[in-house]
Amino acid sequence: MLRIQKALPNSAIAAKRAIDVLPEKRMTMKTCYMCHEPGVSKEHVPPRCIFPETKDVQENLRQNLITVPSCDLHNSQKSDDDAFLLVSLAGIIGNNSIGYRQKITKVNRALKRSAFRLLHESLSNPRIELLEYGPNQFVDVIWGTPDYDRLSTCFDRIARGLHFHHFGTKFTGRTRTLLGYTANPKANPREFQRFICEKVASELKDKPRLGANPEVFSFQFTDPDHFGLFVVHLQFYGGMDVFVGFMPADWVKPPDLVMELINLGIETIIREDGKTYIFNRKPTEQDQRTNPSEESKGENTPA
Ligand SMILES: [Zn+2]
């Protein structure tokens, strides 16, 4: 976008042109954070919509949002996913009051606009219930099971965007998402999830919490381990934790005896930092008496 002012002498015009052009040129010279196409637009990571609007919270929680260069394809793909992420996050209980206010204002507007199609797209078996939070004071709360696969795709993109922003390079390997806020019965068995969350938490203890609006969103990167693996911890609304593991393209899965034992279904006990994790625990006689149908259901087998 060039704005040439005719009244200026030629040299001044040239100088001004250089200034005007520079940011845009810098932008187009970069490629998209997800692919090799030119980055022709900017994308917010995480999506802007998860940050409450000032009119809803009476404070500015949209300061210095992070953006990365994006191609048209990756930018246009994203708006549906953004609304999905917004509703999914709002459907998960246990966040702070900013999260609630976001839910009862912005999310309700988005749901009504979509005639509640969004709700059914985002959660299976969704229901809205009234929650009493004071004498005669109610909010409606969304319950439901999030679409884990689609959520993983959203978090993959956020993690790659943050990688690009934080390190200035594109991450080309694979990622794997672990939702710390809720037990995913399919991919993240509870014991394994607890183990990873606590292990990562101890690695992150001394790492700075980044992000200009930490009540809404903050993130931390671990250092790579000796296999080159590292993790980003995302925190939404002060209490919803998501961990995304980065597996570099040349990463070869280490022949880890412990993981092999767990995968083989052998009872394995890991003790770390004074905590005990038991995988493939054999049901005791007591368990069988009290809950005969509650076999392990693959629950302690990591995916
Ligand atoms: Zn792209």
Image (tube, rainbow, N blue to C red):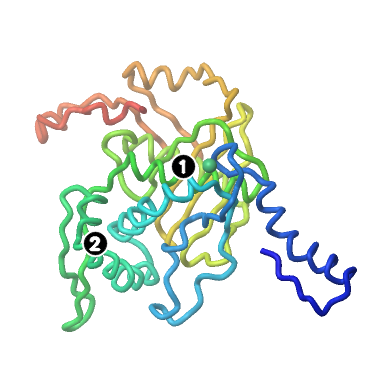
Q: Earlier in the sequence, mark 1 or mark 2?
A: 2
- Residue 156's disc is 1
Residue shown at the point (34%, 42%) measured from the top left: 150
The answer to whether the residue labelled 1 contacts the one labelled 2, judged by CB atoms less than 8 Å apart, is: no
Q: Position of residue 183 (x, y in %)?
A: 30, 43
> How dense is the environment of label 2, judged by Cα within 10 Å: few (below 14), some, or many (20 and up)?
few
Horizontal side of residue 197 vs 167, given as left or right: left
Split into 4 quadrants, where in the image is the C terminus?
A: top left
Q: Position of residue 263 (x, y in %)?
A: 36, 20
Where, by quadrant of the figure, is residue 282 drawn? top left
- Residue 38's disc is none
Residue shown at the point (11%, 34%) measured from the top left: 291
Distance Cα–Cα, label 1 vs label 2: 25 Å
Q: Position of residue 182 (x, y in %)?
A: 32, 48
Q: Nearer the viewer, residue 8 or 120?
A: 8
Residue shown at the point (24%, 62%) measured from the top left: 114
Q: Nearer the viewer, residue 44 or 259?
A: 44
Secondary structure found at label 2: loop
Where, by quadrant of the figure, is residue 187 drawn? top left
As shown in the figure, which amino acid type bears the numbered disc 1? Answer: Asp
Q: Which residue is mark 2?
A: 114
Q: Nearer the viewer, residue 19 or 79?
A: 19
> How dense is the environment of label 1, judged by Cα within 10 Å: few (below 14), some, or many (20 and up)?
some
As shown in the figure, which amino acid type bears the numbered disc 2? Answer: Ser
Horizontal side of residue 287 vs 23, given as left or right: left
Where, by quadrant of the figure, is residue 41 drawn? bottom right
* Residue 80, placed above or below residue 102: above
Secondary structure found at label 1: helix
Q: Position of residue 69 (x, y in %)?
A: 59, 51
